[in-house]
Amino acid sequence: MVGGCALRYALENPAVGGVTAIGRRKLDISHPKLKEVLHQDFADCSPLAEALSGQDAAVYCLGTYTGAVPDAELRTITVDYTMEFARVLRASSPDAAFSFLSGNGADPTGRSRIPYARYKGQAEKALLAVGFPRVYLFRPAYIYPVEPRKEPNFSYRLLRAIYPAFRVVFPNQVIRADDLARAMVDVAVLGTRERQRLVFENRDIRAMVESRVATNGG
């Protein structure tokens, strides 16, 4: 959901010279900037070493929903896949920035009783130890899907239904998928060359979006 928005925004962004999209299925997108790389086993990203060479930034959005898979698989996808990808990217493009889609409540101490928060926190902590010069951790709350989709469970169906009111009452607990994607791309592309390790909570992401709108008029 977020990765698709990030891809389309990056392709439209004049500051981006080229985009390498890595996924399991072929995209229904054609663009002169786009290079597609199909990869099935994210437990082993070694075959991606060449594709990841010479990259300036990565926007990493791979993930799954709590309850969609068993706990062990949730940890594998959230932590192990992230670290395997980061390992290969770091070896191939040591100066790359890393923009990571984490989640609200992510707990780097590993003490959270909520598996999703615990595993996202573990992934954050491990990413910061890899050695990238710039790591940006995004912790959105509810991500509103801007395109029609089949919701993964009742909670998401309910949140989508009440989103207009929820956004008014709890503005810092929601973010549009396209706004989140733009923020993740912008900070990776436009961030300074200084070493930075920044965490963006939902409130911070909204502030980035509002600042962008005020500056660019949309």
Image: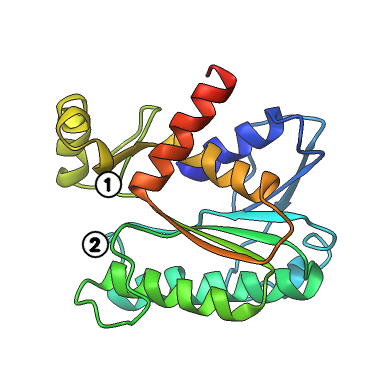
Disc 2 crowd, CA 10 A, few/some/many (<14, 14-19, 20+): few
The dot on residue 67 is 2
Q: Where is residue 80 in the image (x, y as percent from the top left)?
A: 50, 77
Q: Quadrant of the image for the N terminus? A: top left
Residue 17, percent across and down? Answer: 82, 38
Inspect the image, locate mark 1, and give the three-letter code of the amino acid beneath it. Answer: Pro
Q: Is any part of residue 162 visible from this angle?
A: yes
User: Of the numbered discs in the image, which one, if any, rests on residue 166?
Assistant: none
Left or right of 198, for residue 38: right
Residue 20 pos. (x, y %): 74, 48
Q: Nearer the viewer, residue 114 or 193?
A: 193
The quadrant holding residue 103 is bottom left
The residue sitting at the top extreme is: 217
Labels 1 and 2: the sequence-earlier one: 2
Q: For residue 85, which quarter of the picture?
A: bottom right
For label 2, the SS is loop
Identify whether 170 is placed above or below 31.
below
| Residue 193 location (% of width, % of height) | 74, 58
Residue sitting at x 42%, y 60%: 102
Which amino acid type corresponds to the residue marked 2 in the rendered image?
Gly
Q: Do the residues labelled 1 and 2 touch (CB within 8 Å)?
A: yes
Q: Residue at x 27, y 61 (%)?
A: 66
Question: Disc 1 marks which residue?
Answer: 152
